[in-house]
Image (cartoon, rainbow, N blue to C red):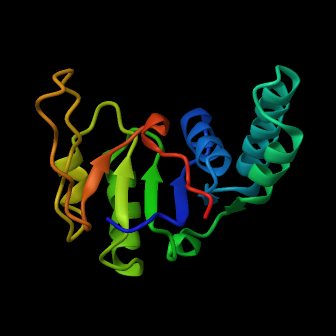
Amino acid sequence: MTDTGRVGVLGCGLMGSGIAQVAAAAGYETIVRDVSQEIWERARGGIEKSLAKLVEKGKLSATDRDAALKRLAFTTTTGDLKGCDIIIEAVTEDLALKNALWSELDRLCGPRTIFASNTSSLTIAAMAAATGRAPASRSRSPSSSRRASSPPPTATRRCSASTIPRRSRT
């Protein structure tokens, strides 16, 4: 798999803003899309507050906080996620809504863009059906002897903020 350069996040409620914060703090350019500027302004304020608490506790430097905030962008236009290497969906648990977004993004994004979902109740296969991409899922088996194979580059997969690796600084 190629190095991820730009992360897109669909939805900036509690989960989406958390995913966006982790991605930006890990060094990734991150663009977050939600339906209104009011929603993403609230999310940005929450991220700023969360990062400020990390600085206050000594877990993050002020320089790293400022850099993370500079890597965050917000939009109401789904098409602005076109250049992302991975798009993580964190919208309402409504299959029709998710599939409408995936279908639109499938037309806009290149075949190497990875689609991931933070869904808790819907199947990845049901969402992948709205696209031309193959469904994939990471094994959550505690057995270290059994590893999930890497999904194809056009996969749609389940994801959480904890699966976003820190970006290497080269």
- Which residue occupies the foreground of this view, 44 or 78? 44
Kindly indicate the quadrant of the structure image that contains residue 151.
bottom left
Position of residue 168 measured from the top left corner of the image (x, y, whole percent): 56, 56
The spot of residue 64 in percent (x, y) is 79, 45
Q: Position of residue 126 (x, y in %)?
A: 19, 50
Residue drawn 75% across and 39% down?
47
Residue in view at x 78 percent, y 27 percent: 54
Please tell me which residue lies in front, 13 or 109: 109
Q: How many marks?
A: 0
Q: Is residue 78 left or right of residue 117?
A: right
Q: Residue furthest front?
A: 170
Using residue 81 as the reference point, say whether residue 122 is left or right of it.
left
Taking the spot 83% from the left edge, 32% from the top edge, the residue there is 49
- Residue 70, above or below 154: above
Q: Nearer the viewer, residue 89 or 56?
A: 56
- Residue 117 position, x and y percent, is 37, 46
Q: As drawn, is 70 to the left or to the right of 157?
A: right
Q: Split into 4 quadrants, where in the image is the C terminus?
A: bottom right
Q: Is residue 107 placed above or below 166 in the rendered structure?
A: below
Residue 94 sits in which quadrant?
top left
From the image, which quarter does the N terminus lie in? bottom left
Q: Quadrant of residue 45?
A: top right
Q: Nearer the viewer, residue 145 or 53?
A: 145
Residue 28 located left or right of residue 164: right
